[in-house]
């Protein structure tokens, strides 16, 4: 399995709005993607520092979401709520419990 870790900063005054978008729009879109396994959104409401982790069955599944434009489409749903350029990293899942 493979994971994509994406770091962003969310406007702290709009944290609940970001959570709503992720939970009600992004998660549904992810569930329709081939190879999607799970996701988690982590964040600090004071600083706005946030991280998403998505888990994919294969490296190809993870990469396809970037190459197809799906990743960029999901980021676009947040508009100005995200105040930094998303920093994305793909990693192999070595242990999952």
Image (tube, grey):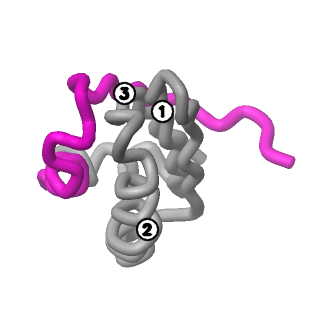
- Mark 2 = which residue? 27
Pointer 2 local density, CA inside 10 Å: few below 14, some 14–19, many at least 20: some
User: Looking at the picture, how far across and down is residue 81, in whole percent?
Assistant: 25, 42
- Mark 1 = which residue? 50
As for residue 90 lying within the magenta part, the answer is yes
Residue at position x 65%, y 37% in the image: 93
Relative side of 9 to 50, left or right:
left
- Residue nearest the viewer, comparing 21 with 57: 21
Pointer 3 with pointer 1, Cβ within 8 A: yes
> Quick one: SS at disc 3?
strand
Residue at position x 49%, y 51% in the image: 58
Q: Which residues are magenta?
A: 68-97
Is 44 located above or below residue 29 in the figure? above
Residue at position x 24%, y 23% in the image: 84
User: Looking at the picture, how far across and down is residue 2, in whole percent?
Assistant: 54, 42
Relative side of 53 to 67, left or right:
right
């Amino acid at each position: 399995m493979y994971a994509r870790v994406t770091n962003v900063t969310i406007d702290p005054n709009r944290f609940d709005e970001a959570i709503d978008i992720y939970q009600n729009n992004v998660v549904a879109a992810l569930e329709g993607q081939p190879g999607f396994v799970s996701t988690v959104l982590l964040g600090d409401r004071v600083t706005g520092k946030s991280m998403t982790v998505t888990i994919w069955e294969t490296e190809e599944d993870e990469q396809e979401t970037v190459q197809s434009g799906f990743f960029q489409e999901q980021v676009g749903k947040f508009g100005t709520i995200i105040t930094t350029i998303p920093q994305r990293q793909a990693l192999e899942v070595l242990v999952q419990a």
